[in-house]
Image: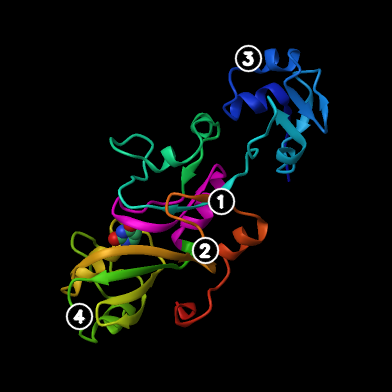
């Protein structure tokens, strides 16, 4: 469901400039709707996603209106923060998108040295639904380990009794799927700080590389290059909450 808003406010909140600047763009005939110039800057308009197909600003298609959900292939070395020093994931998005209100934020975080599937959205309700511990949305990681698995890890991760250093509660049961002596998928339903790295540390191993490839039934597509992102449609957002196929579905 889309909300009805004033056009100048909508575009200002989407980072196109102040309301006054948007009004000037309207006067200059630079904003077009369904092929015709908009003449009333404070016209009421439904901020639906299809507006991006119907409206142009200075000849360019409108950015996605509020209600954006993005899938980004996080590369190595960028931080999931709005303010840390060093390269931020937000620098991978168009500069105008960084002045949007509501802001586009990452859904949880991946460590600077973790790669893979990262969701971003300006929809606070959706964000909380995905990260809520009550929802148990499974997140699958591919871990590359310093030492070979010894065969005991799967049971320890599944037990619901594994304690991580500094935590007061054991981690919820997680599913390990060994792929080779030193690589495995691990599916977790919580989002604790450095969780996967700390879980392997708790069983005497060390994660050398970590990549998230799935959230719920939503998989990172092979053709989404590191640093690239795409807009998610309704079916893909629904897949976040759908059970994935395979052993991790028993989580
Ligand atoms: N677990 C980690 O250790 N790091 C991440 O980035 C995500 C999960």
Which quadrant holds residue 187?
A: bottom left
Secondary structure of the residue carrying numbered label 1: strand
User: Does the magenta portion include 125?
Assistant: yes
- Give coordinates of residue 190: x percent, y percent: 39, 63
Look at mark 4 in the image and give the residue it sits on.
148
Look at mark 2 in the image and give the residue it sits on.
221
Q: Is mark 4 within 8 Å of ligand 1?
A: no
Which quadrant holds residue 124?
A: top right
User: Does the magenta portion include 181?
Assistant: no
Tell me, yes or no, whether the two marked residues, 3 and 4, touch with CB atoms within 8 Å.
no
Of 120 and 62, the residue lying toward us = 62
What residue span does the magenta drawing correspond to? Answer: 107-133
- Sequence-first tag of 1 and 3: 3
- Give coordinates of residue 116: x percent, y percent: 41, 59
Q: Callout 1: 10 Å neighbours few (<14), some, many (20+)?
A: few
Instruction: Point out which mark residue 21 bears.
Output: 3
Report ligand 1 position as a quadrant: bottom left
Tell me, yes or no, whether the two marked residues, 1 and 2, touch with CB atoms within 8 Å.
yes
Q: Kindly report which numbered mark, 3 or 2, lies closer to the viewer in this rendering.
A: 2
Secondary structure of the residue carrying numbered label 2: loop
Look at mark 1 in the image and give the residue it sits on.
230
* C-alpha span from label 2 to label 4: 28 Å
- Give coordinates of residue 168: x percent, y percent: 24, 62
């Amino acid at each position: 469901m889309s909300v009805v808003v004033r056009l100048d406010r909508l575009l200002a909140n989407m980072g196109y400039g102040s309301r006054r600047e948007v009004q000037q763009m309207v006067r200059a005939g630079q904003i077009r709707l369904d092929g015709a110039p908009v003449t009333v800057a404070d016209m009421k308009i439904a901020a639906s996603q299809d507006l991006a197909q119907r409206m142009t600003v200075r000849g360019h298609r409108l950015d996605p209106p509020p209600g954006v959900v993005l899938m980004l292939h996080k590369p190595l070395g960028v931080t999931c923060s709005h303010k840390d020093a060093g390269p931020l994931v937000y620098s991978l998005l168009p500069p105008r998108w960084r002045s949007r209100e509501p802001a586009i934020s990452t859904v949880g975080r991946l460590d600077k040295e973790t790669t893979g599937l990262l969701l971003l959205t300006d929809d606070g309700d959706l964000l909380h639904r995905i990260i809520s511990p009550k929802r148990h949305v499974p997140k699958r990681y591919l871990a590359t380990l310093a030492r070979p698995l010894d065969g005991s890890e799967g049971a320890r991760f599944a037990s619901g009794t594994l304690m991580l250093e500094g935590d007061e509660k054991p981690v919820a049961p997680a599913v390990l799927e060994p792929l080779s002596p030193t690589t495995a998928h691990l599916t977790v339903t919580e989002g604790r700080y450095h969780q996967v790295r700390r879980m392997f540390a708790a069983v005497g191993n060390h994660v050398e590389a970590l990549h998230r490839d799935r959230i719920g039934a939503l998989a990172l597509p092979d053709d989404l290059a590191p640093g690239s992102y795409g807009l998610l449609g309704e079916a893909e957002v629904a897949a976040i909450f759908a059970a994935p196929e395979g052993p991790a579905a028993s989580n």
